[in-house]
Image (cartoon, helix red, strand yellow):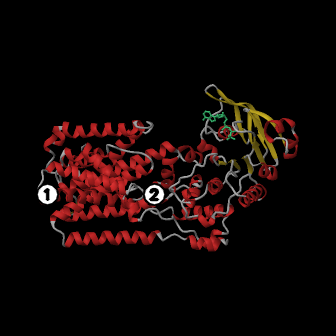
Amino acid sequence: MNTDNAATRLAAPSRMNRERVILVAISALAVLLLSTASTYYVGLVAVVGVNAIVVIGLAFLMATGQMSLGHAAFVGLGAYSSALLTIRLGIPVVLAIPMATLLCASVGYVLAKLTLQLKGHYLPLATLAYGMAISVCFVGAIDLTGGASGLTGVKPLSIFGFAFDTRTTAVLIWIVVALLVIGYTRVYRGRVGRAARALKSNRVMVSAFGVDVPATRTRIFVLSAALAGLAGTLYACYMQFLSPSTFSLNASINVLIMAVLGGVAGPLGAILGAAFFTVIELSAQYVIANVLELPGQVETMLFGAILIIMLLKWPNGLLSWARIGERPPLEADPGHAASASHQKRPAASLEADNVTKKFGGLTALSEVSAAIPSGAITGLIGPNGAGKSTLFNVLTHVFPATSGSVTLNGKPLPLTSQEVVRQGIARTFQHVQLVQELDVLQNVLIGGYINGKSGLFSAAFGLDKAEEATLTREALIALKRVGLLDVAHTKVSELPLGSQRLVEVARALMARPSLLLLDEPAAGLRAPEKERLSRLLQSLRDEDGMTVLIVEHDMELVMGCADYLFVLNFGTLLAQGSPTEVQCNPDVINAYLGTEV
Ligand SMILES: Nc1ncnc2c1ncn2[C@@H]1O[C@H](COP(=O)(O)OP(=O)(O)OP(=O)(O)O)[C@@H](O)[C@H]1O
C-alpha cells in the first residue's frame, strides 16, 4: 500500500474545525443568556458551568485510573479563600481568583504526595478522608467562614472598572468552560494525555517507554485540584454567599456521578454529565412535587432510580451514546510520511554477568552470563518456564537481579526502566500490553514519549502541533514497516492477537532504540506475517544497525533470522552459539528441540 495514499485516507478531522464548533456553540449560549433567559435559567446554567469545570478536572483524573471522593473540598477551598482574600485583605477579586486557584493547586500537590502512593481501595478512602476533613474546617472555622450560617458579603468580579453582574458572570463561567474544553481536548490527545490514559491500564508498560508514573499522576491530580479551586472562585463571585453544605461529601459524590454519567473519555462528557445531572434532579423535583404530589423524600429515590437506569444503559457515560468521544489525533502530512526516517543510534551491546533472580523460594535464573552481540539478531530460546522472560525483565530493569550485574555498552544498566529506554533499549511484552480502548496509531505513539518534550501546558496552548506531526509521521512509518498501516485508526481491541503483537513492535520502534527486545513476537502470527516479521528484523539489523534480542518458540523463524542463540533451561544457560551449532547440540536436542530437528 502506498504510504502517501494511506496517510491521506488516514487524515483525521481537523482539530481546528471542532474547536470552532465548540466556540460558536458557547458564544451562542452566551448571547442567549445575555439577552433572553430569565434569572432562574441564568442561575441554572451558571451552576452547570461551575460543575462542568470541576468535572473536567475530575474526569481527566479518572481517565488516568485515579479517583477522588473529596473533590468538593477543593471547590470550597477555592471559594472560601478567594472570598476571604477580598473581604479580609481587600485584595481585588481579579487577583484573588488566581491566588486561590494556586492555593488549591499547592494543597493538591501536598495531598498527592501524601496519598498517591496508596494502592487499591486505600487511595479513594484517603481522598474521602481529606475531603471530609477540609469540609469540616469550613463549618468549624466560624470566625473566618461564618460556620454553618455561611459567609455573606462575598464580592462580585470587577475587571478594569467593569463590574460583572450575575448574567455576565454566567457568561464568563461558560467562556472558561469553553477554553477548558479546548485546552483539555488538546492535552487529552497530546503526549502527556496519551501517557496518562495508558497509565490506567498498565504502569509497567508506560514506565518502559519513559513515563515517570508518580510525577505524571501528581501533575494530573494538581491540575484537577486547581480546576476545582477555580470553579469555586467563580461560584463565589456568582453567588456572593457561601454555605459549607455546598462543599460537603454529598457534593463530592454528585460531581463524581456527573463525571461517570457524562463519561470520562473526553471533556464534552463533563458538560453532558453536569447538565444531565441538573436536568434529572430538577425534573425529579418537579414530577414529585407538582405531578405526583408526593413528599420530598420520594424525589431522592426517583432521582437515584433514574441515575441507575442511565448508568446501566450507558455504562461508559452519555459521551459514548452521543458518539462524540475519541477521534484520531493530528493528521499525518502525506507529503512527508514516506520520507521521514528514524534517527540511527550506534548499535548497543548488552551483557548479563552471573545474573541470578529469585522469586521467594523459586530460582528463575541461576548465574546466567550472556553477552548480546552488537548489531546482530540474537535468539533466546528454551522450554516453557526456562527463565527467558525473567531474563528480559532483568535486562530492561522491570525488576532488579537478586545478584549479578547487567551492563549496557560497558556501563551498569540504569536503575529505572525510564532511564533504560532513554539509553536506547525498547521492548515488547510476552503478554500484550496495549491500551485496548485506544486506536492502533495512538498506541504506537505512546512509544514515542521519550522523543517528545511537550507537557500539559504546551499541549493546552496548542504548542505541540509540530512535535505531534513529527511523531505521527514516524508512527505511520513504523506501522507501515510492520504491515499495519491500513488499521492505524482501528481500536486495538478489534485486532487479532497476532496483529496486536506487531503493534507492540511498531510501538517499540517509536522509541528509536539501538537495542530491541522482542518477547515472543511471532505468537499468533500467520505464515505470511511471520515472513514479514523475519524480513523486518533483518532490515532493522542491516539498514538501521539495530541490535535485536528475540525470545521465540517458533524455531523456523528463529533459525531463519538469528545470527546467534542462547539456550536457557531451568534458569541456567544450557548452550550458546550459531543456529547451526545449537541445532546440533545434543543437550539442546534433549531438553528442547527434540529429535526431528
Ligand atoms: N513475577 C514472578 N513472580 C513469581 N514467579 C515468577 C515471576 N515471573 C516468572 N516467575 C517464575 O519464574 C519461572 C521462569 O518464568 P519465565 O516466564 O521467565 O519463563 P519463560 O522461559 O519465559 O517461559 P515461557 O516460555 O512459558 O514464557 C517460572 O517458574 C515462573 O513461574
Q: Quadrant of the C terminus?
A: top right
Q: Residue at x 85, y 43 (%)?
A: 583
On screen, residue 135 above or below 155: above
User: Where does label 2 land, which residue?
Assistant: 188
Disc tally is 2
The residue lying toward the viewer, choosing from 349 and 569, is 569
Q: Earlier in the sequence, mark 1 or mark 2?
A: 2
Real-space Cα separation, disc 1 to disc 2, in angstroms: 44 Å
> Relative to 597, is 3 above or below?
below
Query: In the rendering, at what x and y percent does residue 323 appear?
Result: 41, 65
Residue at image x 32%, y 51%?
257
Location of the N terminus (image quadrant)? bottom right
**Position of 585 relative to 5 (above/below):** above
Expressed as whole percent of the image width and height from the top left, the position of residue 236 reads 22, 53
**Which numbered dot is residue 139?**
none
Q: Within 10 angstroms of label 2, few (less than 14), some, or many (20 or more) residues?
A: many
Residue 292 — which label?
1
Query: Which residue: 69% across, 48% down?
Result: 520
Is disc 1 placed on a helix, strand or loop?
loop
Badge 1 amino acid: Leu
Residue 269 in view in this figure: yes
